[in-house]
């Protein structure tokens, strides 16, 4: 009989400790891995210096270790990738929408990673005109993002932004649509989008601070001139604010918005007077957030003034928009969050969040009557879509649920008839009838009821034996709505339940839900998630040896916090591009996103916030105890959560954890925060994450 010697477990990378003392408010921290931080200059250098090479060696060693540890799942990863890719209709196109005499749509072609953009003049029967083939732009590029496609009012010029690094510094380019030739105008270091003046010769764009990436200035550009000659029409002096520019629905006004977490300010200028001076609509006041739009000689203002926590909608004449003239159009309600609105000549359509669900409400501006669009499912998400023709009686909206693929509807606001234009096709043997969605309510330790949305394949038995993936975000007031994801089917069809915890820090239950999960209330976000996990275990949906948690970016912060607090609840955790070094990052104004997020997390230069943030910062709170299996992903070029945060976190976890569970770091060396840019290539990361969980679950 042959004896079989077990393979030796590979050695995990051992990052060198180089203690750096950090002192704030007479409190000392020692960061052993601060050396992993590189500047953009170092990353872009043709020849890496000693520190850069050391960082690259470490990241590559971690990638090699991850590949080795998950090597036995390579076949499963490939199976998952092909399965998820196989559900996507490769030859597909969007529903056309009408704008300024043209129908616009995009198309994907078989085997192509990127879209092609088209238009048709006047009618859908007209000959199609190719505007842009992103596949050609992406040729030879490791990464390609194209954004901000914008057509001049005379329909002759296309402007768009490109980013080939994934740092979100976009270069704006212009194309003559009559000849297909590129103009000589090139504008670098922008957000990627222009707003056209009425003359089709002048446009405005937002310039970025090259180091911090803050959108800090509005520039005016005249076609045919050098970008060096562009005129700065506005600079945002307050480093906690960013700015952008757009145009009202009536297209009469250009609008500059300055904003940060608690405060906004708008400036307006007639679009037919691009050389004029912008004027302030309402001066900024701390904790006053507002947005404006215009139609029929009136301004509509969504505002939280006068303690309207969930916002209200006001209306005022355009010739005298002083706040004394504002009149209530939609009053404030304690149980309804006014999320936004879109304007037509005869209608106003509001997006309202009620009991953790999106609702669409239609107002007839002539009769004053209003009604809600009906939706059938218990758990769903609806959104107002592209509606560029103010004279229309038809509202375009999208609908999806955990079991229904994204669907596009036209809704006649006069007859109240709806028409399904397209439901995203899911290839293979998919049928929505095979799956069941539920809305549950978990009780937090303080008695707050937390909504939980979940979906499973029919035949699921609530006996506590099934694996589950619990997902959440819980920051910035962003609501993680229950929507369809064809990739998740690969888990559901293998026995998983997929659940979303709508924890505080989002806005699912109104603006107060956000307020109760930020700043000095941030700990609620983390305890809510663990309370939801405990609830799902108690209700026999799963058990701690089958429960997996996942979150990305600020949701990655969530993952880091919950495993420090209650690691025993989870078999495995996937933390994608996680924001885990909270205090050090928020103390450094040179890092992108820091300054205008002090009102989200707190400003640790103030002692109260410093100690509170320190109490949950995942990197600072790593303990000598057992952790679940953890897979961490990041991007070397990430502009939102710098790669060194997850890299340092993994190094510290590996040094301090007392278990033998897997701890893996996967760095995409060619991408940033959003991962790979192609529609198929990004599925490779999903396949890796799912294989990690399926392998641990024994499915």
Image (cartoon, helix red, strand yellow):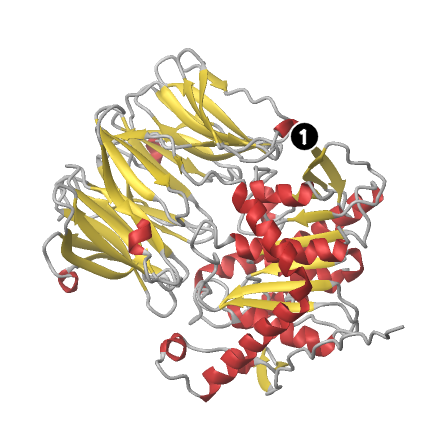
Q: Quadrant of the N terminus?
A: bottom right
In-front residue for pair 3/171: 3
The residue at the point 37 percent across, 62 percent down is 214
* Left-right relation of 35 to 570: left
Q: Which residue is mark 1?
A: 434
Rendered position, 176 above or below 395: below
Q: Nearer the viewer, residue 316 or 492?
A: 492
Q: Count numbered badges in the picture.
A: 1
Question: Residue 49 appears at what percent x and percent y?
Answer: 42, 87
Q: For residue 463, which quarter of the picture?
A: top right
Q: Quadrant of residue 539?
A: top right
Residue 334 placement (x, y as % from top left): 58, 33
Residue ranking furthest to the left: 224
Residue 606's x, y, as percent?
A: 55, 69
Q: Is residue 614 visible?
A: no
Local crowd at mark 1 within 10 Å, few (<14), some, or many (≥20)? few
Q: Residue at x 14, y 53 (%)?
A: 183
Find the residue positioned furthest to the right.
1
Q: Residue at x 61, y 58 (%)?
A: 688
Q: Is residue 387 visible?
A: yes
């Amino acid at each position: 009989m042959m004896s079989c010697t077990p393979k030796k477990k590979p050695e995990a990378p051992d990052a060198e400790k180089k203690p750096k003392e950090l002192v704030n408010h007479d409190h000392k921290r020692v960061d052993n891995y601060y050396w992993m931080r590189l500047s953009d200059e170092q990353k872009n250098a043709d020849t890496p210096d000693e520190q850069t090479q050391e960082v690259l060696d470490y990241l590559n060693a971690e990638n090699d270790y991850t590949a080795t540890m998950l090597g036995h799942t390579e076949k499963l990863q490939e199976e998952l990738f092909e399965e998820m890719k196989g559900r996507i209709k490769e030859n597909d196109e969007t529903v056309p929408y009408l704008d300024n005499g043209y129908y616009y749509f995009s198309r994907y072609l078989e085997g192509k990673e990127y879209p092609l953009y088209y238009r048709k003049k006047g009618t859908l029967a007209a000959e199609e005109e190719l505007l842009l083939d992103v596949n050609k732009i992406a040729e030879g590029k490791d990464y390609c993002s194209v954004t901000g496609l914008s057509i001049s009012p005379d329909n002759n010029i296309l402007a768009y932004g490109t980013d080939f690094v994934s740092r979100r510094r976009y270069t704006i380019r212009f194309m003559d649509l009559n000849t297909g030739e590129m103009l000589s105008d090139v504008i670098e270091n922008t957000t990627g989008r222009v707003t056209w003046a009425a003359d089709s010769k002048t446009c405005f764009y937002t310039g970025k601070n090259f180091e911090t990436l803050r959108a800090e200035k509005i520039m005016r550009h005249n076609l045919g001139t050098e970008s060096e000659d562009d005129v700065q029409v506005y600079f945002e002096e307050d480093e906690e604010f960013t700015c952008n520019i757009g145009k009202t629905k009536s297209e009469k006004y250009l609008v500059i918005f300055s904003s940060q977490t608690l405060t906004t300010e708008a400036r307006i200028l007639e679009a037919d007077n691009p050389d004029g001076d912008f004027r302030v609509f309402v001066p900024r006041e701390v904790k006053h957030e507002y947005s404006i739009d215009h139609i029929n000689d009136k301004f509509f203002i969504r505002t939280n003034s006068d303690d309207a926590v969930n916002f209200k909608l006001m209306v005022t004449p355009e010739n005298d928009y002083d706040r004394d003239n504002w009149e209530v159009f939609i009053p404030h309600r304690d149980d309804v969050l006014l999320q936004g609105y879109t304007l037509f000549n005869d209608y106003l359509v509001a997006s309202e969040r009620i009991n953790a669900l999106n609702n669409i409400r239609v107002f007839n501006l002539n009769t004053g009557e209003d009604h809600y669009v009906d939706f059938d499912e218990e758990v769903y998400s609806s959104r107002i879509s592209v509606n560029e023709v103010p004279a229309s009686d038809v509202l375009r909206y999208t609908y999806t649920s955990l079991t229904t693929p994204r669907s596009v509807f036209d809704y006649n606001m006069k007859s109240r008839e709806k028409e399904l234009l397209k439901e995203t096709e899911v290839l293979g043997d998919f049928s929505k009838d095979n799956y069941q969605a539920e809305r549950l309510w978990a009780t937090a330790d303080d008695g707050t009821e937390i909504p939980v949305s979940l979906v499973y394949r029919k035949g699921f038995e609530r006996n506590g034996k099934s694996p589950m993936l619990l997902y959440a975000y819980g920051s910035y007031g962003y609501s993680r709505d229950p929507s369809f994801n064809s990739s998740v089917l690969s888990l559901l069809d293998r026995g998983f339940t997929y659940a979303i915890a709508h924890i505080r820090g989002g806005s699912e239950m109104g603006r107060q839900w956000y307020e109760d999960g930020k700043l000095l209330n941030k700990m609620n976000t983390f305890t809510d998630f663990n309370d939801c996990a405990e609830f799902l275990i108690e209700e026999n949906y799963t058990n701690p040896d089958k429960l997996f948690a996942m979150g990305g970016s600020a949701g990655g912060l969530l993952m880091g916090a919950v495993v420090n607090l209650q690691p025993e609840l989870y078999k495995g955790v996937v933390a994608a591009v996680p924001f885990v070094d909270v205090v050090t990052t928020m103390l450094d104004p040179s890092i992108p996103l820091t300054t205008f997020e002090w009102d989200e997390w707190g400003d640790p230069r103030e002692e109260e916030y410093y100690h509170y943030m320190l109490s949950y910062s995942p990197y600072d709170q790593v303990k000598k105890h057992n952790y679940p299996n953890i897979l961490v992903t990041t991007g070397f070029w990430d502009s939102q959560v710098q790669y060194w945060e997850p890299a340092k976190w993994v190094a510290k976890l590996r040094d301090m954890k007392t278990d033998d569970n897997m701890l893996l770091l996967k760095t995409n060396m060619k991408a940033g925060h959003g991962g790979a840019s192609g529609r198929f290539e990004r599925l490779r990361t999903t396949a890796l994450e799912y294989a990690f969980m399926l392998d641990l679950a024994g499915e």
